[in-house]
Image (spheres, coloured by chain):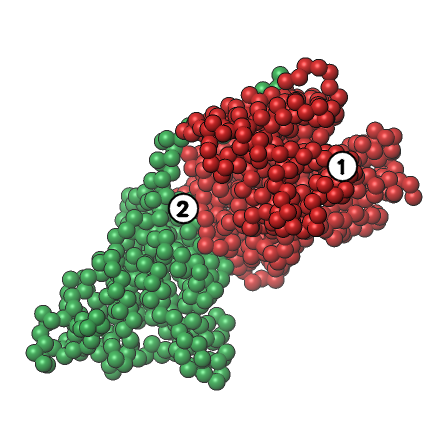
Amino acid sequence: MAIEHSPIELTKADFASDQMVKWCPGCGDHAILASVLGIFPEIGYKKENFCIVSGIGCSSRFPYYVNTYGFHGIHGRAAAIATGVKIANPKLSVWINSGDGDATAIGGNHFIHVIRRNMDVNYILFNNRIYGLTKGQYSPTTKHGQVTKSSPYGLIDYPFNPGELVIGARGTFFARAIDNSPKTLGEVCRAMAAHDGAAIVEVLQNCVIFNDKTHRDVTDRAFREERQLWLEQGKPMIFGKLKDKGIVLRNNSLEVVEIGKDGITEKDLLVHDSTIENTGIHMMLAQMAPPEFPMAFGVIRAVKKPTYNQLFEQQMAEVKASSKIQCMDDLLNSGETWEIK
Amino acid sequence: MTTKKLNQKEDVVVKFVGDSGDGMQLTGTLFSDTSALDGNDIATFPDYPAEIRAPHNTIAGVSGFQVHIGKRIYSSGDKCDVLVAMNPASLTSNLKWVKKGGTIIVDSDTFTEEAFEKAGYTSDPLSDDSLSSYSLIKAPMTSMTQEAVKDIFTDKKSADRSRNMFALGMIFFLFNKELDYTDSYLEKKFKKHPDIVNANKAVVRAGYNYCENTDVLLQHQVEVTQAVMPKGTYRNITGNIATAWGLLAAAERANLPLFLGSYPITPATEILIEITKHKALGAKVFQAEDEIAGICSAIGASFAGAMACTTTSGPGLSLKAEAIGLAVMTELPLVIVNVQRGGPSTGLPTKTEQADLYQALFGRNGEAPCIVVAASTPSNCFYWAFEASRLALEHMTPTILLTDGYLGNGSQLFRIPKMEDLPKINPPFATPNDKTYAPYKRDPKTLARQWAIPGMEGLRHRIGGLEKSDGKGNVSQDPANHELMTKYRTEKVQRVANTIPDQVVNGDEDADLLVVGWGGTEGNLKLAVEELREEGKKIAITHFNYIMPLPKNTEEILKKYKKIIVCELNMGQFVNYLRMNFQTLAFQQYNKIQGLPFEVTELKEKFNQILGE
């Protein structure tokens, strides 16, 4: 099911669409678009072999802004539509853009099932913790207690952590990035594209109009190094402006430690392995949040497992090879039939 | 088989009823297949309980299978001539379906006090006088079955499993049928269990011989007239299997892979199960997490170039409504099969109804026209599934195929077509690297847009649920453009009428009454009208399969008749649709909302009443 590569080298310009980008000035979506346009030529597939599918919401306008095949669906259903695209033509590179409302509220069912099946799609989840297009109602990722237009007295819902959903559904790939960090955003998107199976990237995205600075507790310049742990495969988990903090596993749970204090050295730190099948550590990493912990970024989980599409094609080939019924005439005349003369 | 001259009957309805585990479906199928091989036309209908395995000997656990055989068979029949009841509960729940004076065959061994009380009888119906208006045959099937297999099985439980074969043997005798087909079926089915084969064969013969040796029963023996059918190869087929095969056949004739995205729902699940078996034919089946994912995956597959379908029943169609609108807006080919059942809500899941017509025609937000067609017999589900696919693909429009529980589960003889005799389906594919391609550029004749498939070079484009500009297909909020596009989508569906055959009337040109039906009621309506004509009444019938759009000559036909009665299994959805379209015409209506098909007798009574007015 290899996807055909472009015979010529492509550039960002090959994927630029002629449509005016209508997101608000300062919206985090612009940066995500720039990152995707940046990595598509690098991935190297023919332009015609990309298909971007979305649901409804600000982020779901994405397909109109990339010159590939694109489908702007209905609210919450991008994953289901993309599933059909990928099964019908596994030789397409299928991308999904969805927001926190689209993916985890109205589309929550499709979200967990596309992950459970390990459908071979690349899913970018724009998490701004608010409904932007409908102008500021709370979403399933809005913080408990927050005042929004639909929670004027403070939100009593408890939020979802998308990473927990992905790993809870035994997803094979989960990464987290921030909209205003193009380099790291590009890196996780690249890793996502290289992954076979359902790859989910949660991007902490800022909605300047309706939920400005919602991610400030991890993105503020004043303390972001203390609040962000960038994971690297095979490397100890170190963070902090002075690279003086780390994560250890103690009594089956994670703990923040200071390197050099109480005899702690780099060797005591947890070394990141995104490839282990067991979800335990990955789940704990996805759950880390300030103030007690830094938030984990980068590729948290990337596990190898046959994709739905590989299994699907393989099973079809096997059945076809062994079946006595190879065309409709065979089927129509199979079983009990009789002649009337 | 008896060679003496027997009484002839043109048709006979036999219903086998018993506990869910009694094997009534198999018994009925063996009888109908045997009859078909013997030259009878046949139709069958299963009567499943809603519960999977209700408690033993209770009314909730009764399962049945009705078989109609004879010379001219349009449906599985109304009331039965012969009821075979394997226990008291099945007798009490099915007595209302037996013709007055009909024959009732019971396993008398099962009428213990405990069992008949469980079935609601206060005294033994076999010995009080309550069945005196029927001819009652009390056969001790359980004990005679045990006797027949005593050399094979020593335990009663194993023996009792063959009890249905005793009933089958009796029915074979009464209708003078051979046992060979059943023998060969048993040999194949239980190849690895010769004991079971031998036991069942012995029991069928025991049932047969029991009748032959019982004087009273000898008088009951009749010969059912053979049908005169066109030459060809035949098979028995249910509506749901025929639908599945019609979809597969359309994909083959369109030279496209079939994609089915579905979620299990009674009574449509059988279509999903059947198509899944045929991966070898290139059918890609995706059992989705819900109805919405079923149709959305199909829309995605259609965008990606497959012949896409989704199958469901009423509540599922409700869930798919928004997505059908998306397919209308993106103008992608999509077949939506709705095997209707009794509604609203969960309603009567295992019963039939035609009450989703409004939903199919109008059940979406905005102006969202779809093509709507309806199958009308179990076997023509094949052709209507094929036609729905052809229309969807060639007109780039979602098409809804309505069948119903009665068609889906019912079976009929099906004359097997040759694939080369079915029309080729030609979707309007775009040409790669066509510089003039635009997503909403239309064929001037059909108004269908072109189908450019991801992967095709030089045709990258974006479509979606937002209104698009005419031709170019960019997002557009322009008021005049929205009106134009709305009219295009409507007109595109209307123009389908240019490519479909004229509506046909059967019966007298100068009839006093025109009977109008649509969908799954065809068999019984046709038979009622034919019988009345044979009785000298001036009556005609026109039965609709194309619903949206209607055939072009519809008004011309309807206005010829002074009296028109529209018969349907709902509160009058098709009649109101006709009233909306033909406001100068007067329509009477006849409706039934009992989860059951029309009966020929009640139809004739109604038609006679109108004819007499």
Q: Residues within 10 Å of mark 2 (few under 14, many from 20)?
A: many
Residue B196 relative to residue B11: left or right = left
Instruction: State the green chain.
Output: A
Residue B513, x across and y down, in percent? 85, 39
Does residue A251 appear in the picture of this structure? Answer: yes
Give residue B511's quadrant in the image: top right
Q: Residue at x 78, y 45 (%)?
A: B566
Instruction: State the red chain.
Output: B
The residues tagged by marks 2 and 1 sit, at their Cα atoms, a distance apart of: 59 Å
Residue B282 relative to residue B495: left or right = left
Residue type at mark 2? Ile
Work out whether B239 lies above or below A82: above
Looking at the image, which residue sits at the far right? B613
Q: Chain of mark 1?
A: B
Looking at the image, which residue sits at the far bottom? A153
Label 1: element kind:
loop
Q: Chain of mark 2?
A: A
Label 2: element kind:
helix
Q: Considering depth in this image, is A235 or A99 the residue closer to the camera?
A: A235
State which quarter of the image contains the N terminus of chain B: top right
Does residue B377 appear in the picture of this structure? Answer: no
Numbered tag placed on residue B378 in the rendering: none
Q: Residue at x 45, y 67 (%)?
A: A105
Instruction: Name the residue tied to disc 1.
Output: B134
State which quarter of the image contains the C terminus of chain B: top right
Instruction: Name the residue tied to disc 2.
Output: A87
Residue B550, x across and y down, in percent? 71, 43
